[in-house]
Amino acid sequence: MSRAKKKTAAPTQPGTVVASFGRQFTVELADSTLIACVTRGKRTDIACGDRVAVAMTAPDQGVIESTAPRASLFYRSDIQREKLIAANVTQIVIVLASSPPFHAELLDRCLAAAEEAGIPALLALNKMDLPAAAQALQSLARYRALGYDVLPLAAKIDIAPLRARLAGHTSVLVGQSGMGKSTIINRLLPDAAARVGELSVALGGGRHTTTHARLYHLDAVSHIIDSPGLQEFGLVHVAPEDLAHAFIEFRQHLGQCKFNDCKHLTEPGCAITAAVERGEIDAQRAESYRKLVMQLMKKAQRWE
Ligand SMILES: Nc1nc2c(ncn2[C@@H]2O[C@H](COP(=O)(O)OP(=O)(O)OP(=O)(O)O)[C@@H](O)[C@H]2O)c(=O)[nH]1
Ligand SMILES: [Mg+2]
Ligand SMILES: [Zn+2]
């Protein structure tokens, strides 16, 4: 038997991360108590929705000792670093709006990330009460044609259509700033008081914007995470061949290019380019894919 005394680990309690502020986290214990937590070392790879073990250091403070294996992880990555958005979600709700206009390229990136993570996505087109709504809905026809679920919504007027789609899920709301994510939270949970982007006297005329992810409970089996508005969405963690697969309409054409390692950029004999030319793949979607691949290749050059 070893003579070295085994260090006894501090007793821990299981909990769920319900808010993440960079290196600080709020963990909810089984009895609903909220604990302000830091991590061991300088770990930052913990996300809202993670199930963790907490060692208490004070009645309302603790240290996250470990995280449980995740059923899913939704994240983005740029050249410098990875940004974890939410863990263990079963549905990604991409919130779009008729006004301000949404960026189709960002939508394509969110969808590719959802495909890559194996998490189903729902496209919620919010602010259907505004005049620009009809045109915005029309612009989503091509996503519908691909099989993506599009839900027209006016969160301010009636949240019921979305509520029905959240039952039994842990959902994360993602999208650009100002699309109405926090408004959705407030309509679902009037007590949540999530800050929404109304003009604020306190902010000297500035707008409230969500600065960190937060998990809310809708009922015992349905949960929803609000997240800060996305300004960028890199996918440099995804290999080029997986990226092509994440654009679902590419799949049926893959393996048919002249070159085995075709990246579907300007290579001759590319089956994706041919499908775009025949009108079978939307040119804008192909362009979204190409921009992602070019970003990836830039990264590869850096590290080689
Ligand atoms: N007309 C209309 N306005 C809405 C609707 N839903 C939200 N808004 C408005 O859109 C603005 C932005 O709403 P937020 O909920 O703060 O948007 P957000 O997506 O949380 O924005 P970030 O936190 O910055 O990412 C606010 O002024 C809301 O009142 C809607 O259904 N119709
Ligand atoms: Mg918000
Ligand atoms: Zn190709």
Image (tube, rainbow, N blue to C red):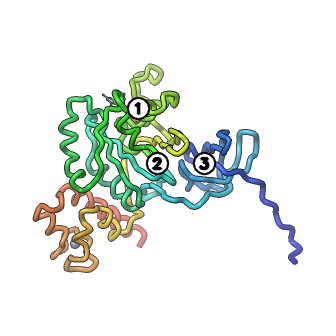
Is residue 21 at least partly visible in the picture? no
**Cα gap from disc 1 to disc 3, whole angstroms:** 24 Å
Quarter of the image with the N terminus is: bottom right
Q: Is the CB of mark 1 within 8 Å of ligand 1?
A: yes
The residue beneath circle 2 is 169
Say whether disc 3 or disc 2 marks the residue closer to the N-terminus: 3
Q: Is 98 on the left or on the right of 235, as rendered?
A: left
Q: Which mark is drawn over residue 69?
A: none
Across and down, in percent, residue 272 comes to 19, 68
- Asked if 154 appears above or below 303 in the picture, the reply is above
**Amino acid type at image mark 2:** His
To which residue does mark 3 refer?
Answer: 16
Dividing the picture into quarters, in which one does residue 278 lie? bottom left
The count of marks equals: 3
Q: Above or below — where is 240 with respect to 204?
A: below
Q: Nearer the viewer, mark 2 or mark 1?
A: 2
The residue sitting at 20% across, 51% down in the picture is: 142
> Dots 3 and 2: beta carbons under 8 Å?
no
The percent coordinates of residue 58 (x first, y second) are 76, 41
Q: Would you say residue 24 is visible in this rendering? A: yes
Give the numbered dot on residue 183. Answer: 1
> Considering only order in the chain, which callout, 3 or 1, is on the residue closer to the N terminus?
3
Q: Give the class, few, some or many, for how many residues have Cα within 10 Å of label 1's Cα (few <14, many ≥20).
A: many
Q: Secondary structure at mark 2?
A: loop
Would you place residue 192 above or below residue 75 in this image? Answer: above
Q: Residue shown at 47%/50% (left/top)? A: 85
N-terminal of the pair, mark 2 or mark 1, is 2
Where ligand 3 lies, by quadrant? bottom left
